[in-house]
Amino acid sequence: MDKDIDNMSEKELLAELVRQGRRAERADMIKICVLGVALLAIVILALVYIPKIVAPIRQLSDSMEQIEASFDEAERVLSSFDEKTIDQFKQTMESLNETSQQARVFMEKLKDSGLDKLQSTIEGLSSSLNTFLKLFGR
């Protein structure tokens, strides 16, 4: 207030009260508008970012369900193994290991036997035959 309240007339006091009321109303309206704009911005941001956040969460949830199903399947398979099955699996793996070692030895023997030389000889013979055929116009 610019003037001293004690020296104001009733009309001046009333006018000053009306001005203060209007200022308070404008200030309240500005606050309400700012809050409305802020609320609108929050709603828009939520509409934009929530789908971006929800998609990975759903994907993670689906992945977790698949992992859980895989664990359940693995548990079911493992629970079906008894000692006899484990022994048979062990024997099969030992047999497979032995067979692979025998195959490795066999491949080494084939390599040492000169099959690679035989292949180059056959390729040379094929080349010679092609040249011979070309001479006779075939």
Image (cartoon, rainbow, N blue to C red):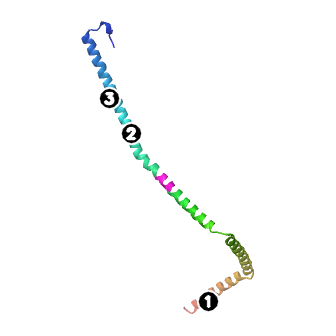
Label 3 CA crowd tier, 10 Å (few <14, some 14–19, many 20+): few
Image vertical order of residue 70 relative to residue 116, above or below: above
Looking at the image, residue 64 sits to the left or right of residue 37; the answer is: right
Q: Image quadrant for the N terminus?
A: top left
Residue occupying image coordinates x 62% and y 87%: 126
Outermost residue, top direction? 7
Q: Secondary structure at mark 1?
A: helix
Q: Image quadrant for the C terminus?
A: bottom right
Q: Which sits earlier in the primary sequence, circle 3 or circle 1?
A: 3
Looking at the image, residue 32 sits to the left or right of residue 122; the answer is: left
Horizontal and vertical percent for residue 70? 56, 62
Judged by depth in the image, the label closer to the viewer, 2 or 1, is 2
Give the distance between the C-alpha atoms of the residues marked 2 and 1, in whole angstroms: 85 Å
Amino acid marked by disc 3: Met
Label 2 CA crowd tier, 10 Å (few <14, some 14–19, many 20+): few
Q: Secondary structure at mark 2?
A: helix
Q: Can you identify the residue that label 3 sits on?
A: 29
Magenta residues span: 55-61
Horizontal and vertical percent for residue 50? 43, 47
Residue occupying image coordinates x 41% and y 43%: 45
Outermost residue, left direction? 11
Q: Can you identify the residue that label 2 sits on?
A: 41
Label number found at residue 129:
1
Q: Which sits earlier in the primary sequence, circle 2 or circle 1?
A: 2
Q: Which sits earlier in the primary sequence, circle 2 or circle 3?
A: 3
Q: Secondary structure at mark 3?
A: helix
Look at the image and say whether residue 11 sits in the magenta stretch: no
Outermost residue, bottom direction? 136
Horizontal and vertical percent for residue 58? 47, 54
